[in-house]
Amino acid sequence: MDIQHNPDKQCFTIALGHISAVLEYSLLSEQNVDFTRTYVPSEFRGQGYAEALVTQGLAWAEQQGLKVQASCWYVRGFL
């Protein structure tokens, strides 16, 4: 699974043909990040894409030394 991090758009994505699964975040400060939204197109749900995105996003936050909060209900399940 090829997960791309796009810091300029503050998201992680997985290309699924012409559409993407996405994990969006917002840097609240130099020390805090809020994961705001996880989206997987309906035809790709249940295949592990959202979990892979969240796992990658949380690993990135840990590597950056960021405190994590989650507005997204799905991400909250991993905290």
Image (cartoon, rainbow, N blue to C red):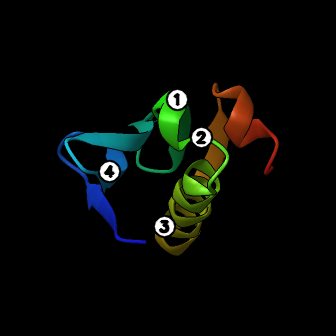
Q: Residues within 10 Å of mark 4 (few under 14, many from 20)?
A: few
Q: Residue 67, position in %: x, y?
A: 63, 51
Residue 60 has which mark?
A: 3
Q: Residues within 10 Å of mark 2 (few under 14, many from 20)?
A: few
Looking at the rendered structure, the kind of residue marked 2 is: Arg
Whether label 4 touches label 3, CB < 8 Å: no
Q: Earlier in the sequence, mark 4 or mark 3?
A: 4
Label 4 to label 1: alpha-carbon separation:
12 Å
Residue 45 has which mark?
A: 2
Residue 16 has which mark?
A: 4
Looking at the rendered structure, the kind of residue marked 1 is: Ser
Looking at the rendered structure, the kind of residue marked 3 is: Trp
- Relative to the observer, which residue lies in front, 70 or 1? 1
SS class, disc 1: helix
SS class, disc 3: helix
Q: Which residue is mark 1?
A: 42
Q: Residue 62, position in %: x, y?
A: 59, 68
Residue 39 visible within the image: no
Looking at the rendered structure, the kind of residue marked 4 is: Leu
